[in-house]
Amino acid sequence: MIFRAGFLRRCATVFAVASLLAPAQSLAAEPSPGETYHESSHSEEEHAAGALIFHQFVGEKIYIQGQGELYVVLEAAYGKGNGEQELELGGELAIGVTDRMQIVAEVPFVLVDQDDGPQHNGLGDLSMGFQYNLVQGPDFSFGVRSGFVIPSGDEDRDLGGGQFVWEPNLLGALRVGQSEIYAGVGGEVHTGNGDPNAFTYTISGAYPWRQLIGSVDLAGTVSGDAHEIYLAPGLWWNVVDYLQAGIGVPIGLTSDSVDVQIKTLLVFEFF
């Protein structure tokens, strides 16, 4: 789900704990001023902590989704740094198998323009996975996700990592007042003798105002001696009940990170 600038090193290890904050609202209460994205529905999962926004600009976020609901995420991301420019266009599909379990798949198309080499474009690495929310309440949600990266991109053309990767995550959301805070820890476990395994972490916050939602994401990847950290301020707009649009600017905070990125997301909800 997910722009891996400069083809991030995949990772692994253990992770631990997630917490978030967001607008408090009960099932019987009137929607808050920032709630328009789900205001036409009153199911329990759509009032659970973590439902304010569906996606993040960097890092991983817990998904809150009802049984039979379908989310389609369209993504365009541009990044520059580490001797190359990269444009990624992606499509993600999330299906609610039950009120607490989702399956997810993502297909990216990547264009890489190296400063001292040729330009390449084509299909990137495919991602698939599932998530199960162990706790899903109005004030706190907590879940586990198991994702897999399939090396479908051409590694020789810088379109993929060339390795099968397992990506386990622990994800959480906590609602406090009208804010939500999201947190997660996870890893990337690589097969073969390529990139070393990695530890990943994310902490984010979101706050609604009318039809707008401001967000700030902080995500990092520790792989061997390398440490990538991104800070991504963003803005979401609840266009209509079934469409949320967002734009974010992930900024690299370390020498291992891509200098700056621009990412736009469209999140469609179908019942």
Image: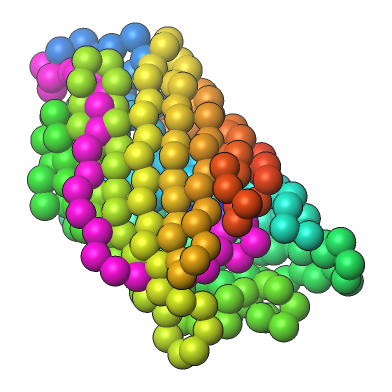
- 42, above or below 252, in the image: above
Q: Position of residue 245 (x, y in %)?
A: 54, 32
Boundaries of the magenta span? 4-28
Left or right: where 173 falls relative to 95: left
Residue 268 appears in the figure = no
> Is 106 a magenta residue?
no
**What quarter of the picture does the C terminus occupy?**
top left
Left or right: where 152 falls relative to 154: left
Q: Which is more toward the observer, 95 or 84? A: 84
Residue 96, located in which quarter of the rendered image?
A: bottom left
Q: Position of residue 178 (x, y in %)?
A: 27, 16
| Residue at image coords 57%, 42% | 253
Q: Which is more toward the observer, 74 or 213? A: 213
Q: Which is more toward the observer, 121 or 80? A: 80
| Residue at image coords 62%, 74% | 160
Q: Position of residue 164 (x, y in %)?
A: 46, 81
| Residue at image coords 42%, 86% | 191
**Magenta part, dominant SS:** loop
- 44, above or below 219, in the image: above
- 164, above or below 122, in the image: below
| Residue at image coords 52%, 62% | 226
Q: Position of residue 42 (x, y in %)?
A: 20, 27
